[in-house]
Image (cartoon, rainbow, N blue to C red):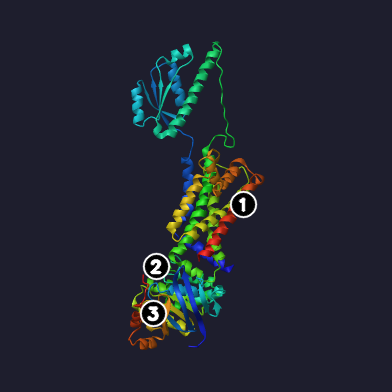
């Protein structure tokens, strides 16, 4: 027990003396937590649209106004020849060009049907396509408005309409930050637990001090505990700053569920992910190797955790990987507790699965650690 | 020098696949002796030393260190030995005092013991004023002297030194050997590998490893007489010239 205290004392001194590591442990995660959610926003805004209006009627200017007023579009051009619109796409000044044909108002009033032409700049395909679908909805809305007006004037019977309404549960304002912040925080804790711990252990191999430890009477499990406990504590501290300060005061996210439950899960999760870091360190001899190996897995952990993309919409084989990924469960728990107020009963399985991960990674790492020296 | 046996190896062998790193070496080292362990790179010195320190399990043969068996009692061996590797073995990002505290602590010294022995060590090396300096900021020669002193801080019965003076200037090497003599005078057995033949002359007995075998073992004087040469360096050349393995 006294040995562990000496080990912990040494580790904390080394960590807090490391001018490169300290900002990586505390500064970078918090900067990422502040910057990433603002950038990782699925809501597409500022779509540049050019309107080619051959009609110049009351209807066409009403439609243009309506598009402008949504706030999603930025009217970057208003012209009367399609050639100019084409040029704006070529110069990347417009993501979309909407062409309103001549006699738009007339035809619409006379025949009730009119075609609009929409050109999409597919270079930034996502933005333009999302813009196109927004736009279709706005136009549908507009035609509904016109129908309504017709009906009010007592004109002929309205054509039947299918109305699609959607509402967003748990994130009523569809604020992506609510969705992203808990997920990113979960990921940052993963980086500290899985990445930094592996580097730290391998560093002793690289500079040769591990030999000195191995010829001493230190038991292997004491050494491992001495290495992992500091990162467990740091993981807890970084999480607390992220959850109780950054989320709370910058994003105004107050967990709906129990903070205690969240911390209980974090405590278990860190044991599992530190086991992963230890495992990486047993298979590598230099920090560079450890970094490459850890980076490979961390990328998979990140992209296949449901952080950015929904697991439900992944292909079957990818779902299998996603559910073999410990980060997936932690992100689910984070979002569940913070946004939905999930309780112990809802999360029992998640606790069980994470306990299995913890046992799996740590026993494999311990087995391999023994064998290698 | 008493004749108590400190290290005993009998047919000690280590194979890596078909490669025989250490080939049936048999020798005894007496308590308080300075035992030189010579050999070209790749001759099997480090492998033999690692087996004796309990870092590597032998393939066959017997060995005991400080009376403990290397197969069954490696943990007891570790309590009774000090070790200083060719790579620098203190923590460069800790101060001198912190290193002393850490290594004293993991060998089970009490806080009071660490304080007393630490102060004594600093006084012996004349490093009191540098106690709070990072080890990484010290010149190499100082680091090596400090590493040795830390390796014997817990009063081990035997200390293993693996090329301790590599890259160190001649004056500092001489000072380093003064530390070795002082430790030997206290009864610590010194097991040292080196490439410096002048250092071999300082040893009580010298062994020469060639291709995993121990081809010679005697006092420097006897070896020189046996080979009819004037220096250990020439003894070494005679033996190592026939080596098949080289790096």
Chain letter, disc 3 residue:
B
Left or right of A325: which side holds A349?
right
Using the image as rendered, state which of residue A49 and residue B65 is in the foreground: B65
Q: Provide residue A338's location: percent of width, then percent of height.
A: 59, 43
The residue beneath circle 2 is B137
Which disc number belongs to residue A17? none
Kind of element beneath mark 2: helix
Give the residue displayed 39% in from the left and 16% down from the top.
A102
Distance between mark 3 and mark 1 Cα atoms: 57 Å
Q: Provide residue B33's location: percent of width, then percent of height.
A: 46, 84
Q: Provide residue A270's location: percent of width, then percent of height.
A: 56, 54
The residue beneath circle 1 is A264
Residue B14 in view, yes or no: yes
Q: Are marks 1 and 2 on the same chain?
A: no
Whichever of callouts 3 and 2 sits on the residue coming sooner in the sequence is 2
Kind of element beneath mark 3: helix
- For residue A51, what is the image quadrant? top left
Crowd class of label 1 (few under 14; some 14 to 19; many from 20; radius 10 Å): few
Q: Provide residue A80's location: percent of width, then percent of height.
A: 36, 20
Crowd class of label 3 (few under 14; some 14 to 19; many from 20; radius 10 Å): some
Is A185 rendered above or below residue B59? above
Left or right of B97: which side holds B108?
right
Give the residue displayed 40% in from the left and 22% down from the top.
A99
Distance between mark 3 and mark 2 Cα atoms: 20 Å
From the viewer's perspective, is the residue at label 1 or at label 2 nearer?
1
Chain letter, disc 2 residue:
B
Distance between mark 1 and mark 2 Cα atoms: 43 Å
Chain letter, disc 1 residue:
A
Q: Are marks 3 and 1 on the same chain?
A: no
The residue beneath circle 3 is B175
């Amino acid at each position: 027990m006294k040995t562990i205290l000496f080990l912990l004392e040494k580790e904390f001194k080394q960590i807090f003396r490391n001018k490169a590591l300290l900002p990586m442990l505390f500064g970078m995660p918090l900067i990422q937590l502040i910057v990433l959610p603002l950038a990782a926003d699925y809501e597409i805004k500022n779509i540049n649209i050019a309107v080619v209006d051959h009609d110049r009627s009351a209807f066409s200017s009403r439609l243009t106004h309506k598009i402008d007023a949504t706030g999603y579009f930025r009217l970057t051009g208003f012209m009367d020849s399609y050639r100019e619109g084409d040029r704006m796409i070529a110069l990347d000044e417009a993501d979309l060009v909407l062409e309103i044909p001549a006699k738009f108002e007339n035809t619409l009033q006379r025949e009730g049907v009119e075609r609009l032409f929409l050109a999409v700049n597919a270079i930034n395909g996502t933005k333009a396509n999302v813009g196109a679908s927004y736009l279709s909805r706005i136009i549908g809305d507009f035609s509904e408005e016109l129908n309504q007006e017709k009906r009010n004037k007592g004109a002929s019977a309205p054509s039947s309409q299918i109305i699609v309404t959607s509402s967003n549960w748990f994130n009523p304002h569809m604020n992506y930050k609510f969705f992203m912040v808990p997920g990113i925080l979960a990921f940052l804790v993963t980086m500290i637990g899985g990445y930094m711990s592996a580097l730290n252990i391998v560093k002793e191999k690289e500079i040769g001090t591990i030999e000195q430890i191995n010829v001493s009477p230190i038991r292997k499990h004491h050494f491992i505990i001495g290495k992992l406990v500091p990162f467990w504590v740091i993981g807890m501290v970084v999480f607390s700053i992220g959850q109780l300060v950054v989320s709370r005061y910058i994003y105004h996210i107050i967990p709906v569920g129990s903070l205690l439950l969240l911390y209980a899960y974090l405590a278990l999760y860190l044991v599992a992910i530190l086991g992963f870091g230890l495992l990486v360190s047993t298979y590598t001899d230099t920090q560079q190797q450890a970094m490459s190996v850890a980076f490979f897995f961390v990328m998979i952990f990140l992209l296949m955790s449901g952080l950015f993309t929904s697991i439900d919409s992944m292909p079957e084989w990818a779902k299998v990987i996603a559910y073999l990924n410990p980060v997936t469960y932690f992100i689910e728990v984070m979002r569940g507790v913070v946004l939905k107020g999930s309780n112990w009963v809802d999360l029992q399985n998640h606790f069980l699965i994470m306990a299995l991960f913890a046992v799996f990674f740590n026993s494999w790492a311990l087995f391999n650690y023994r064998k290698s020296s | 020098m008493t004749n108590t046996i400190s290290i005993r190896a009998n047919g000690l062998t280590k194979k890596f696949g078909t490669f025989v790193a250490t080939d049936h070496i048999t020798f005894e080292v007496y308590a308080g002796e300075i035992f030189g362990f010579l050999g070209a790179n790749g001759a099997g010195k480090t492998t033999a030393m690692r087996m004796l320190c309990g870092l590597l399990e032998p393939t066959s043969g017997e060995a005991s260190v400080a009376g403990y068996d290397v197969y069954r009692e490696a943990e007891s061996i570790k309590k009774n030995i000090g070790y200083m590797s060719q790579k620098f073995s203190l923590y460069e990002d800790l101060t001198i005092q912190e290193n002393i505290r850490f290594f004293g602590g993991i060998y089970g010294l009490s806080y009071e013991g660490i304080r007393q022995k630490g102060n004594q060590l600093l006084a012996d090396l004349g490093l009191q004023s540098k106690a709070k300096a990072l080890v990484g900021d010290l010149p190499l020669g100082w680091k090596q002297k400090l590493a040795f002193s830390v390796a014997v801080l817990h009063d081990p019965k035997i200390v293993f030194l693996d090329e301790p003076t590599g890259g160190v200037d001649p004056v500092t090497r001489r000072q380093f050997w003064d530390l070795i003599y002082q430790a030997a005078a206290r009864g610590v057995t010194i097991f040292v590998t080196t490439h410096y033949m002048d250092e071999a002359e300082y040893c009580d007995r010298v062994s020469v490893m060639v291709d995993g075998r121990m081809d010679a073992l005697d006092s420097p004087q006897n070896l020189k007489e046996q080979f009819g040469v004037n220096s250990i360096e020439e003894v070494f050349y005679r033996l190592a010239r026939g080596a098949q393995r080289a790096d």
